Amino acid sequence: MTDDDAADLLEVLACCKVGGATWCDGDYLVAPASDTESSSILLLYGNGVVGFYEGSCLWIHESHRGKGLATPLILAAALDRSGERGRNCALTVLPRDVDMHGYSPAGLAAHDRAFVALWATQCDLRRALSDVRMLRDCEALEEPAESSGRPLRKFAQR
């Protein structure tokens, strides 16, 4: 979903009541919108909506992209959908009747990461969500000299 396409939907979702938190890390919170007709999962930062998963539309504001926030958003949406059937287990992170052809390369990669997280917990959505952590800012490190004998790494987690 493009930023322009998301703007109209974001306006509506920003006015929704927020249900109980499904996931949180630092100042980020993932929670369902409690007063919408369809299943809407919100990504909140502070008091504002900075992302959502609405139907099959996944979007995160560009200033919050690249932090691994799509994974908990996708897993929370899968949990919300599985809750309709009273289960905590899912074999997919995709909405019903959706295939991968409609997602952007970034959206496809995000769903792939969420699927890997889900399968790492043997399809336990709650455990997958509790295991997910936001990616922290990385800082560039000086490349060691080839003679140091250490593997070359360009980034390290702070």
Image: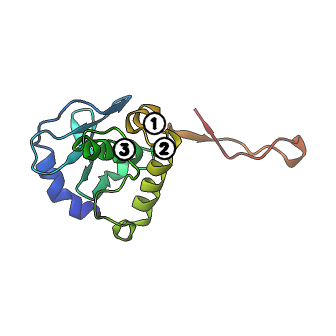
Q: Mark 2 or mark 1, which is nearer to you?
A: 2
Dot 3 surroundings within 10 Å: few (below 14), some, or many (20 or more)?
many
Q: Residue at x 28, y 64 (%)?
A: 97
Along the horizontal axis of the image, is 25 left or right of 7?
A: right
The residue under label 1 is 132
Do the CB atoms of the residues marked 2 and 3 lie less than 8 Å apart?
yes
Amino acid found under the numbered disc labelled 1: Val
What label sits on residue 117 in the rendered view? 2
The image shows a total of numbered marks equal to: 3
Amino acid found under the numbered disc labelled 2: Ala
Cα distance between the residues tagged 2 and 3: 9 Å
Q: Which element carries disc 2, helix, strand or loop?
A: helix
The residue under label 3 is 75
Say which label, 2 or 3, has the lower sequence index. 3
Cα distance between the residues tagged 2 and 1: 8 Å
Q: Quadrant of the C terminus?
A: top right
Q: Mark 1 or mark 3, which is nearer to you?
A: 3
Q: Is residue 6 above or below residue 90?
A: below
Say which label, 1 or 3, has the lower sequence index. 3
**Going by the picture, which residue comes out furthest to the bottom?**
101
Q: Residue at x 18, y 52 (%)?
A: 10
Residue 28 horizontal/vertical position (percent) = 33, 34
Do the CB atoms of the residues marked 2 and 1 lie less than 8 Å apart?
yes
